[in-house]
Amino acid sequence: MGIQCLLLGLRTSRTFISAYRFTGIQSSRAFVFTASQTFKVKDIRSILCCHVRAVSVRNAYSFTSAAVAKDVVLFEHDRTRFFRLLAIFCAGQFLFWVYLAQFAFTSLRDTRKNSSEPQKVRTELGGFFSFDMNLGSNAWRYGFTLGCLIIGGGIVGVAVLFSRRSVSRVILHKGGGKVTVSTQSPLGPLRAHSLTVPLSQVACHAHRQESSSFIPLKIKGYKFYFLLDKEGTLNNPKLFDITVGAYRPL
C-alpha cells in the first residue's frame, strides 16, 4: 500500500514537472519569437527610413545640385548666317550715309549771287507752314553732314550691340562655380566673343516660360541684357532653371 502511494506520488510529480517544463519552453519560445519579430519590425522600419532618406537626398541632389561632374552645354543657338546678312546690310547702310555726308559737305554751296545777301529758298511742307532756308550755309552744310554720319554710325552701333548681346552658347563648367557665355558673331561660333564669370554674378530676370521671344540674362558689370533666343536648344532645362535661369539679386 505504501509502495503504491509512493508510485502514485512520483507519477503525479512527473506529470506536473513535464507540464511545467512544456509550459516554460513554450513561454520562452513565444518570448523569443515576439522579441525576434519586434527586432525584425524595427530593422525593417529603420531600413525603410534609411531608404526613403537616401532616395530623398538623391532626388534633391539630382534636381537642386549645380555641382556638375563635367562641363555642360545648357543652351546653344547658332545664327551665324543671319548675323552675316545683318553685317552686310549694316556695312551697306554705313557706306551710303558716309557717301551722303561727303556729298552734302562738298556739294552744298552758299546760294548767293553777286550780292552779299544769300539767296533763300522758299520751302513749303504740306501746305501747313513754310520757311526760307539757305542750304548752302555753314549751319545747314555741317548739320546735314553730321546728321548723316550719326545715322550711319548709329545703325552700325546698334547692330554691333545686338550681336554682342545675342547669346549663342551657355556652358556650365565643372563644379558649377563658373559660367561661360558666348555671343553671336558673323565670323562663326569659333570666333565669337565669350566671357567667363562666376555663377553668382549671373541672374535671369524673367522665367523662360514667361518670355515670349527672348530670355533676358543679366551679368554683373555689364550693361544691357544678354538675350537668349527661345528658338534655341535647352539641353537640360531643369539644370538651367536652378543655375543660369534662377533669379539672384546683383
Image: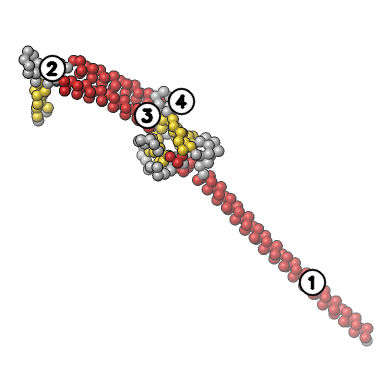
Mark 1 vs 2, N-terminal side? 1
Mark 1 or 2, which is nearer the eye?
Answer: 2
Image spot of residue 173 (x, y percent):
51, 36
> Residue beneath label 3, please?
163
Q: Amino acid at mark 4?
A: Leu
Mark 3 or 2, which is nearer the eye?
Answer: 2
Q: Amino acid at mark 3?
A: Ser
Which quadrant of the figure contains the N terminus?
bottom right
Q: Is residue 58 left or right of residue 181?
A: right
Q: Are marks 1 and 4 in contact (CB under 8 Å)?
A: no
Q: CA distance from mark 4 to mark 3?
A: 15 Å
Q: Are marks 3 and 2 in contact (CB under 8 Å)?
A: no
| Residue 209 visible to the viewer | no
Q: CA distance from mark 4 to mark 2?
A: 53 Å
> Residue beneath label 1, please?
22
Q: CA distance from mark 3 to mark 1?
A: 93 Å
Q: In the image, what residue occupies the spot 15% across and 16% down?
A: 109
| Residue 250 visible to the viewer | yes
Mark 4 or 2, which is nearer the eye?
Answer: 2
**What kind of element bears circle 3?**
helix
> Residue beneath label 4, please?
190
Q: Amino acid at mark 2?
A: Asp
Q: Is residue 178 left or right of residue 229?
A: right
Which quadrant of the figure contains the C terminus?
top left
Q: CA distance from mark 3 to mark 2?
A: 43 Å
Image spot of residue 168 (x, y percent):
42, 31
